[in-house]
Amino acid sequence: MNFRAVFHLIAYLCAFTSIGQWVSWAVARGYQDPAQAQSGLLQAALLTGIISVVLWWLTRGPVDLKRRDGFGIVTFGWLVVALLGALPYVLTGAMTDPSAAVFESMSGYTATGSTVLESIETLPRGVLFWRSLTQWYGGMGIIVLAVAILPFLGVGGMQLFSAEMSGPSKDRLTPRIESTAKLLWGVYLLLTVLAFAGLRLAGLDNFDAINHAFTAAATGGFSTRDASIASYNSLSVEMVFVGVMLLGGISFPLHFRAVTGRPLNYFRDAQVRFYFIVWGIGTVLVACNLYRAMGLPLGQALRDGVFQVTTMTTSTGYVSADYDQWPAFSRFILLCLMVVGGCSGSTAGGMKMIRVFVLIKKGLRELFLFIRPAAVLQVKVGRKSVPQDVLSKVTSYFIIYMLVWTLGTLAMSAYSPDLESAFSSVVTALGNMGPGFGTVGAVRNFAHIETGGKWVLTLMMLLGRLEFYTVLVLFVPGFWKR
């Protein structure tokens, strides 16, 4: 790996982080936050900026990237920005435990939404803005942001884009990868603006609207309220969130095609059809269960079912009701949706709809071949046959996911009072979800987890966001051989 080139580009990621911290400091000044908050954000911005400049100076020179360098930039880049992203929490006094600050920062950049903060509404506005901004950065990927504005370096960005963009396939919209990244960010900005406008019309003030627009477009789930979306108790607010979350869970290349005059591609895409089928079935099952088992009015059951199924399907993690009090059937549906996640190429986490769709079709094919061994059957997504190597990769991903989930649950069982809390904390970290069940459930947080457990979940969040391979490949001895 070309460490000089890798950390030269990471210097630019540090610069983007510093810019965000400067903006957060300006917000703190504008809202007249306490002096310690303003000073802490200023110190964080200065320190991050200095680190960026020094790192850039020490590694300056021609940049020649190979594919393995792309993996290094993504993995080390996320680690570095997560560490620098923790500075505002520590320097402002919002947190005294560095491990908790790194956990919160990683939860932001990976758009997970798990939090260790116990009194969010008492935090200074500048810190809340920084917290939401980390999710907005991480939603599309700070690496793609870097690729979008680094053409002046003369760096070909395909290595970075292929390592960062989620899913079993990479969809290039233009021959030049820099143009692709810019187009994706353009769509992302548009979704953020629409979210802000919708939330303002629904009654939120400017500060809450911009913060929630950041975290909704990123399907991240951080809120400025302790009770999350439940604090608003507004159907119109919830419906705006549902719309934004559903859009955030769809592949962004499809959004680009819709914006450029090809909206029918939504209906032609097999993954999107499967996405809405899963969402619809999940909503009906949960709403019916709440109506029958809990005796909720049909309207309330449908309202709660739609919102919580949407937030779980898109791995956003907002909360409108304490689903820990729901029947076991509804909670199991939510757990399944947490694992599945949204569409490949979206800001959502989880295994991704396309992988689950392919695994189901592959399983059905194996059952048919068991009956008719001589038959020749292909697994198809839409009208396209899935190549055997892709099938193998999807199967391998599922095996790795289950293995990491098992090992993570084993590790977290040492820090959790019960098995439900242990395995759901790992599911929510791997799926970049936010809240889980039990002691990390809907109306609870992760503050009570010991330091070792926080670091386990921090690693799980990184693995889930970068979909295992990008990180795990660094531990393969052959990766480091020339």
Image (cartoon, rainbow, N blue to C red):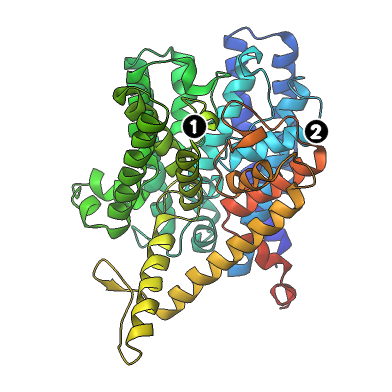
Q: Residue 75 falls in which quadrant of the image?
A: bottom right
Crowd class of label 2 (few under 14; some 14 to 19; many from 20; radius 10 Å): some
Residue type for callout 2: Pro
Tell me the number on the disc at residue 352: none
What residue is at 49 percent from the left and 28 percent from the top?
319
The answer to whether residue 292 shows anywhere in this view is: yes
Would you place residue 355 above or below residue 425 in this image?
below
The answer to whether residue 7 shows anywhere in this view is: no
Tell me the number on the disc at residue 326: 1
Residue 171 percent across, percent down from the top left: 38, 60
Q: Nearer the viewer, residue 52 or 419?
A: 419
- Which of the image's four quarters has the C terminus? bottom right
Labels 2, 1: front one:
1
Measure the alpha-carbon separation of dots 2 and 1: 35 Å
Residue 306 percent across, percent down from the top left: 35, 33
Crowd class of label 1 (few under 14; some 14 to 19; many from 20; radius 10 Å): some
Residue type for callout 1: Trp
Residue labelled with disc 2: 98
Q: Residue 439 falls in which quadrant of the image?
A: top right
Q: Is residue 310 left or right of residue 128?
A: left
Would you place residue 24 above or below residue 149 in this image?
above
Q: Is residue 419 left or right of residue 305?
A: right
